[in-house]
Image (spheres, coloured by chain):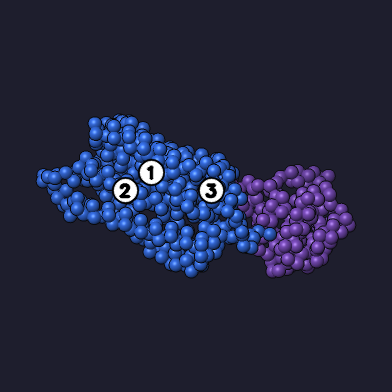
Amino acid sequence: MAARYEHAALGPEQTRIPPGHAWNRLPALGAGCAALGVVGCAILGPGNPKQFFFSWLVSFLFFLSLALGALFFVLIQYAAQGGWGIVVRRIGETTFATIPALAVLFLPLLLGLHDLYSWSVPGAAEHDALLQWKAPYLNVPFFLIRAAIFFVVWGGMGLWYYRGSSGQDVTGDPAVSARLRRFAGPCIIVLAVTQSFGAIDWIMSLTPHWYSTMFGVYFFAGSFVGFIALLSIVSAAMLRAGLLDTVITAEHLHDIGKLLFAFTAFWAYIAFSQFFLIWYANLPEETIWYRARLEGSWEAVSILLMAGHFGVPFFYLMGRDVKRRATTLAIGGVWLLAMHFVDLYWQVMPTLHAEGVRPSVLDVAAFLAVGGCFVGAAGWLMRRQALVPLRDPRLAESLAFENA
Amino acid sequence: MPFDSLRSLTARLPLVNRLPVGPYYGILAEFATPTDLFHACERVRDAGFTKWDAHTPFPVHGLEKAMGLPRSLLPWIVLGMALIGAAAGFGLQVWVHMVAYPLVISGKPFFSWPAFIPITFEVSVLFAAFGAVFGMLALNRLPMHYHPLFRSRLFEQVTDNAFFISIESWDPQFDPTATGKLLQSLGARSVELVES
């Protein structure tokens, strides 16, 4: 009738990238893009350091948000004891295993703290009562300690879950699943807190007089949409490349699409909630952030986000058939991933360019540099492990998964 | 005859109960297990019957595919109602704030569309929910106060532990004896000709 629970035997050609396959060249491709980006930054950066640091910040946040979204996805799969997602869990694990690389990519920002964050400039709080009041939190040493804690925590959790899952490929020990599930709940709480303060430190403090208690949730919403979009793209790309051919089915794509649809709506809900309360109260200390993003051509970007990050994808992903076909789902994923980048760009850049959107070659160079490292690291990791958790006790259930 | 012409009229309406025109309602076949029912449904579907139904005490996974049922109209009803609801909610607020009670609230303009969003969303969800519930009932022709199968002794077990296929007599392929034999051959535990 419906689900078949007999043990599925997956052959090596189904579970690893075959030798000679194009995807073996992903690390090289990533390294090439990174080299190009670094050269671009090295040439153009010194002439325009502020632009460089802001561009680097946007690209860094984009790829970090994907990694953190991946970590959250894997954690909730364990915590909720979900069965359907096991075949795609390795994609999430590979994505967050790049966090150590991203920690290194954070370092260039430390050279530009004074360019990015006005509160970090010595003497900034001298005539500013609000900055004085916030100084116990907004000071460079504490900022650096927090950043170190974030990367240690994220990297540590990521490593623990990655090692646990890939170790289970070899041992097949079901106790691993139980252990990873038991700690998933606390890890989610730790991730939520550290992610919120990361967003507050790195994005919200760009406008140090401004605050929004919803900001952490806003960053999370965007990052989760970003990762699920990435998941849909990678799944579709793998199927097209002949990897995991019978393993990822229309049923899994359907569920990925449902998550993408749901969290697009969730993002819109959070984004609107944050805006609405500030708009309604109309208090100057809160409205400055949105006023800045309705200035000049930033207004067009705001409208683009409303229509493009919510309006269009919501109706596009509504239909059942769109979500079940790899190509149509991946189109939605690519679109939303692009919109997630626009969202982060819109959050960060108005601090540098108040008059309007000023695209720069450094935006592209930074994206290539950070993105190349990210893709290269992920590609390298993909070659070293099986593409699915081979001996997860519930793999057969995931392979036979059918939507009702 | 006036009564017959009325009946032929209602026969064309999708949501009105159609009662059979002959002496029989149809054939009822009982199966012992959901698996038997599932395979029998596939065979009945493949045999080309169109006016038939399966009856089970609990949902059987995949049965709608085994029966060859077309995709439901309900999602479109829900979407339509959601759009109507959004328009209704938004329109209500536009009328209230611009025509009926144009008051300056909190320094905001009369047409303050951000403030209209929560209610628009909620009314849209409300209409969509109504569409889903009442649409589902309507498509299932519920409430159905009478159905010829209720008079079958055999059918009393349908909410308990028995699984049934009923083929209605106005199916073009229906034949009182042949259809019964077919269902018997598909593994039916008992077959009954139900009178209308």
Q: Residue furthest right?
A: B177
Q: Position of residue A329 (x, y in %)?
A: 53, 43
Q: Quadrant of the C terminus of chain A?
A: bottom right
Residue named by callout 3: A17
Relative to A303, B191 lies left or right: right
First in sequence: mark 2 vs mark 1: 2
Q: Secondary structure at mark 1?
A: helix
Chain letter for blue, please: A
CB atoms at circles 2 and 3 under 8 Å apart?
no
Q: Secondary structure at mark 2?
A: helix
Relative to B87, A41 lies left or right: left
Q: Which residue occupies 84% across, 57% down?
A: B182
What amino acid is labelled 1 in the image?
Cys
Q: Colour of chain B?
A: purple
Q: Position of residue A124 (x, y in %)?
A: 14, 44
Q: Residues within 10 Å of mark 1 (few under 14, many from 20)?
A: many
Q: Is residue A328 visible?
A: yes
- Please state the chain letter of the residue tagged with numbered disc 3 in the rendered image: A
- Please state the chain letter of the residue tagged with numbered disc 2 in the rendered image: A
In the image, residue A168 sits, relative to residue B88, either above or below, namely: below
Relative to B194, B120 lies left or right: left
Q: Quadrant of the N terminus of chain A?
A: bottom right
Q: Position of residue A376 (x, y in %)?
A: 42, 44
Q: Which residue occupies 45% across, 62% down?
A: A164
First in sequence: mark 2 vs mark 3: 3
CB atoms at circles 2 and 1 under 8 Å apart?
yes
The answer for how far apart the CA atoms under marks 3 and 1 are is: 20 Å
Name the mark on residue A373.
1
The answer for how far apart the CA atoms under marks 2 and 3 are is: 27 Å
What amino acid is labelled 3 in the image?
Ile
Q: Residues within 10 Å of mark 2 (few under 14, many from 20)?
A: few
Residue named by callout 2: A104
